[in-house]
Amino acid sequence: MIGSRFSYIGRILALLQVLPGILAWGKEGHYAICKIAEGFLNEDAATTVKALLPDYAKGDLAAVCSWADEIRHNFHWRWSGPLHYVDTPDFRCNYEYCRDCHDLSGNKDRCVTGAIFNYSMQLMTYHESKSTSEWKYNLTEALMFLSHFIGDVHQVCFFLPDLENMVS
Ligand SMILES: [Zn+2]
């Protein structure tokens, strides 16, 4: 009985060692997600995306889809860390915006779905800003964040068992 319990725990621990590799899309995952998304853009959207991309992207949205992960640990961008995920209480795989979308300090709207809403709303000002030449937001950053967070929000909800209770 004890042997099978340790065997089960051993398998859990082995799984936990590979989890960091499967819990995040990584650069290739974000690239693939954005490549697929680019194929669904209509002509107007594709033109707008190309207009907003930085020059180094050479018109390829997928080339910048990992940018938000690359800069998140930089001091200047550390504020963006909580925008990459949302935590739900008690390891539940259900989500309620008002309950769950906040950072560790409890600041509302600071989670991945709050960021998607925020950057989507900013990008919706594109045509208005273009016609008045008054840019309220940095829409290049908004596009780069949004394209990344759409990938982040589609990562699987995962559950880590309470190992302490399994051993006792
Ligand atoms: Zn991310």
Image (tube, rainbow, N blue to C red):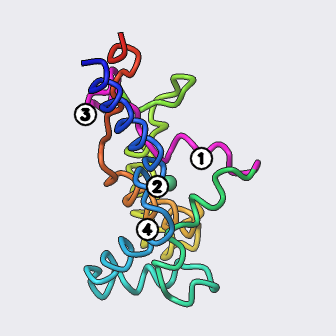
Amino acid type, label 2: Gly
Q: Earlier in the sequence, mark 4 or mark 3?
A: 4
> Which residue has dot 2 on it?
21
Q: What's the CA distance linking mark 2 and mark 4?
A: 14 Å
| Residue located at (24% from left, 18% from top) | 1
Front-most of residues 9 and 128 = 9
Per the rendered image, the range of residues in magenta is: 75-99
> Is 145 situated left or right of 13 in this image?
right
Which residue has dot 3 on it?
93
Q: In this view, does 152 lie to the left or right of 166?
A: right
Which sits earlier in the primary sequence, circle 1 or circle 2?
Answer: 2
Mark 1, other Cα within 10 Å: few <14 / some 14–19 / many ≥20: some
Instruction: Determine whether the beta carbon of the residue marked 1 sits less than 8 angstroms from the nearest atom of ligand 1.
Output: no
Query: Mark 4 and mark 1: span between their CA atoms?
Result: 17 Å
* Marks 1 & 2, CB-CB < 8 Å contact: no
Residue 167: image x %, image y %?
A: 37, 16
| Mark 4 or 1, nearer chain start | 4
Which mark, residue 30?
A: 4
